[in-house]
Amino acid sequence: MNPIHQMLFQSGFEPGTLGVPAEAHEILTGADRSVAPPNDWDALRRNLPPSHPWASAAAGDPPAPTDGPRLGYFDIQYLGGTAEERFARIVEDPTDPGNRVLHFWILHPNERYRGGAKARVQASLYRNRGLTAVTGRVRMYLHPDLEALRGYEPGFAWCTLQELWFGPSWEGGQHPFRISLGLHRDAGAGGELHFCVHGQPAHVEGEEHFPQYPGWGRPTWEIVQRGFDVPTGVWIECETQYRMGDATTGRFAYRVRPAGGEWTTIFDVSDWTYNPRSPAPVPLTDWNPMKLYTSAAVVGCVRDSGGATQVFWDDLAIWGG
């Protein structure tokens, strides 16, 4: 896994970074003084569409790249609910006082959906330009409250931690495709938590419907990695690599390194990274590099055990090429 060396952005959420509003952040402003540029959240904020509620006076689409890839705008999205149900906040590291981290927390499902509800807190980097290859790193801490999910005997395949989008419909894409990475638990007693990932095109008329993925077609590829038990209560460094391509040239790779441990490759997929129906390649237009998106049942399992569905993030770094 060879790194790409053009740094696009980095932050450890340290002083200089401010989350607004305080009770449930929707944007981050300022520049993280703990790392070298590019570290300015306001530079991403200036790319917010003018209609965005937190857009700055200089808001607007990022210009077309002339010298390589560019990130679009950053915000934090909930799609419903209140701070009592869910939030994202910059807080003190639960394991290292003095270190600041980004905290995603959900107590009740906050998004109404098809007569029911689901739960979402996500960091979004949208309207990116020219991202045909990306390496991203972030540290992730699954709160010990998520241990409750090991006892959830029905199992689940939906607890998204990262999602990559290629020409999504909300931006007018004609052939949407996504890569979704998250947690998986097999049904039955004594289940472990594992990572799962799938690359998936949008549903088209005449194709089979999949109740597990409303509005989406049969996954082009799908993997559950049962050889690695995902720990809770420890920091894990996570690295994602993506390259635009077809069944031969496309690539998605993911590896992790628990604190004090060695790198473990979880996925290394050579397959489509855009919709096979698309007449032309589509780059990474939109990205949720940090995400907590799951069902009411998963949130309810953790809440019924006296906890909250929560994840901490730190040391985000993104390279492009």
Image: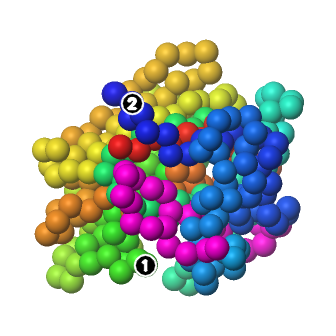
Q: How many marks?
A: 2
Which residue matches tag 2? 3
Where is residue 159? Give x, y as percent.
Answer: 53, 53
Which residue is at a point 49% across and 16% down the rendered structure image?
262
**Magenta region, residue range:** 58-85
Nearest to viewer (mark 1 / mark 2) = 2
The amino acid at mark 1 is Trp
Count residues near mark 1 (Cα–Cα under 10 Å), then give few for <14, some for 14-19, many for 20+: few
For the C terminus, give its image quadrant.
top left
Q: Nearer the viewer, residue 261 or 242?
A: 242
Q: Secondary structure at mark 2?
A: loop
Residue 284's place in the image compared with 134, above or below, is below
SS majority, magenta = loop
User: On the image, numbered disc 1 is attached to which residue?
Assistant: 170
Q: Is residue 53 above or below residue 278?
A: below
Does residue 247 sit above or below 22 in this rendering? above
- The one nearer the camera, 46 or 289, is 46
Mark 1 residue element? helix
Q: Which mark is residue 317?
A: none
- In the image, what residue occupies the spot 22% across and 74% down? 208
Residue type (three-letter) at the residue carrying disc 2: Pro
Nearer the observer, 190 or 26: 26
Image side of residue 12 versus residue 5, left or right: right
Q: Can residue 117 be spotted in the picture?
A: no
Quadrant showing the N terminus: top left
Q: Are marks 1 and 2 in contact (CB under 8 Å)?
A: no
Image location of residue 286, percent across then percent down:
44, 62
- Asked where in the image residue 171 lies, by quadrant, the reply is bottom left
The colour style of the image is rainbow
Q: Is residue 275 left or right of residue 21?
A: left
Of residues 158 and 104, the one nearer the viewer is 104
Residue at 34% across / 63% down in the picture? Answer: 166
